[in-house]
Image (tube, rainbow, N blue to C red):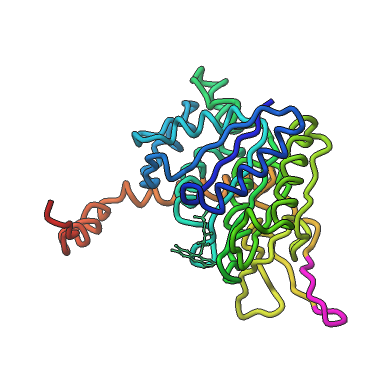
């Protein structure tokens, strides 16, 4: 059994330390551990070419054409029995390098897309996706904020788990971090998270969430999208729509039971979303086949060229 630690922080910084403390806790349970620092890798952003999705939708393996270290990282992630991500807080959310892997682990690794692709592959005799993508595993997200500007962090991080339907054991951000190694309470919590992660990896049926209960009873997020129709609110993480209620001075998010099957981190929700995408795609393809499509594109292609620096 292997627990993988992935730090998105600087070399030997606070995030490396917290990640290693979690791994020490996991190792204490007899688990094999491995440590990766994202900034040591060459990781390019997703270009949105959709090659992976086109391949998966045709029963292929969903390969990505970008040549960098992502495939190496992907192998490590798919092989691990549990993962801890330690991520610096940048601009109130997860640091950019985490967003790069969030996108690269995005639609290509969505459990719904891959389940559908597996069925297509069986029908057409295609390669199909790597079945390790369909395997649940426990994950923990721990973040370091230099201040208390950390309001989007947990939502950003848990989005990665939602794509792959991984079980989140912990999702914690530490505000006003100074020197992690000298902050006993944080060290103890990180160590305990490692033990919990190893226990969950050993028996996934006992895996549970130990973190902040948050506001959304389904995914624990505290981030909501509000429009003008009070008290209507949309959970920014799982997408459930409901109402924010105030009772005895306390805020509560309430939703109808039928919303659960629309949540983006459930198989039902993913299949529902996939059906919506398919309808939209059909309209888009019809527009692309129309006589005026090429003409409409030329207007923008010929208006301004993108500037690039002289090299
Ligand atoms: C570009 C940048 C943006 C940052 N934004 C925030 C922020 O919004 N909130 C916060 O609490 N800390 C912020 N910080 C502080 C970092 O969270 C802190 O330096 C980081 O956790 C250190 O991690 P490391 O020691 O593992 O490299 C920012 C730092 C940088 C470099």
In the foreground, 2 or 292: 2
Residue at 52% across / 38% down in the picture? 36
Query: Does residue 97 appear to the left or right of 242 in the view shown?
Result: left
Q: Give coordinates of residue 168: x percent, y percent.
A: 70, 46
Residue at 25% across / 59% down in the picture? 296
Q: Give coordinates of residue 304: x percent, y percent.
A: 16, 63
In the foreground, 17 or 291: 17
Query: Is 222 situated above or below 206?
Result: below
250 part of magenta stretch: yes
Residue sticking out furthest to the left: 310
Q: Give coordinates of residue 279: x percent, y percent.
A: 51, 49
Residue sticking out furthest to the top: 125
The quarter of the image holding the N terminus is top right
Query: Does residue 94 appear to the left or right of 213 in the view shown?
Result: left
Q: Give coordinates of residue 129: x percent, y percent.
A: 53, 27
Query: Is 245 situated above or below 169?
Result: below
In terms of secondary structure, what is the magenta stretch mainly? strand
Query: Does residue 300 appear to the left or right of 99 in the view shown?
Result: left
Residue at 25% across / 55% down in the picture? 292
Image-quadrant location for residue 214: bottom right
Query: Is 61 situated above or below 189?
Result: above
Q: Which residues are magenta?
A: 246-254
Query: Does residue 80 appear to the left or right of 299 in the view shown?
Result: right
175 part of magenta stretch: no
Residue sticking out furthest to the right: 248
């Amino acid at each position: 059994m292997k627990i993988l630690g992935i730090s998105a922080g600087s070399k030997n910084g606070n995030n490396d330390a917290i990640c290693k403390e979690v791994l020490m806790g996991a190792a204490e349970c007899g688990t094999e551990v491995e440590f990766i620092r994202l900034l040591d890798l060459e990781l390019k952003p997703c270009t949105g070419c959709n090659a992976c999705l086109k391949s998966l939708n045709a029963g292929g393996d969903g390969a990505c054409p970008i040549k960098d270290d992502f495939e190496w990282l992907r192998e490590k992630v798919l092989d691990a029995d549990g993962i801890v991500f330690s991520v610096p807080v940048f601009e109130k959310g997860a640091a950019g390098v985490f967003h790069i892997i969030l996108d690269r682990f995005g639609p290509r690794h969505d459990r719904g897309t891959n389940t559908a692709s597996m069925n297509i592959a069986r029908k057409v005799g295609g390669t199909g996706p790597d079945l390790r993508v369909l395997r649940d595993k426990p994950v923990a997200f721990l973040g370091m904020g230099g201040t208390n500007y950390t309001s989007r962090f947990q939502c950003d991080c848990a989005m990665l788990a939602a794509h792959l339907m991984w079980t989140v054991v912990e999702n914690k951000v530490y505000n006003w971090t100074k020197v992690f190694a000298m902050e006993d309470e944080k060290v103890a919590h990180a160590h305990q998270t490692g033990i919990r992660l190893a226990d969950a990896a050993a028996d996934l049926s006992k895996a549970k969430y130990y973190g902040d209960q948050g506001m959304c009873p389904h995914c624990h997020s505290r981030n909501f999208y509000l429009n003008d129709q009070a008290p209507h609110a949309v959970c920014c993480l799982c997408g459930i729509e409901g109402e924010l209620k105030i009772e005895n001075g306390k805020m509560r998010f309430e939703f109808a039971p039928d919303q659960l099957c629309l949540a983006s981190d459930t198989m039902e929700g993913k299949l529902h979303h996939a059906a919506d995408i398919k309808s939209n795609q059909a309209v888009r393809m019809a527009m692309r086949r129309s006589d005026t499509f090429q003409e409409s594109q030329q207007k923008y292609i010929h208006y301004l060229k993108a500037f690039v620096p002289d090299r």
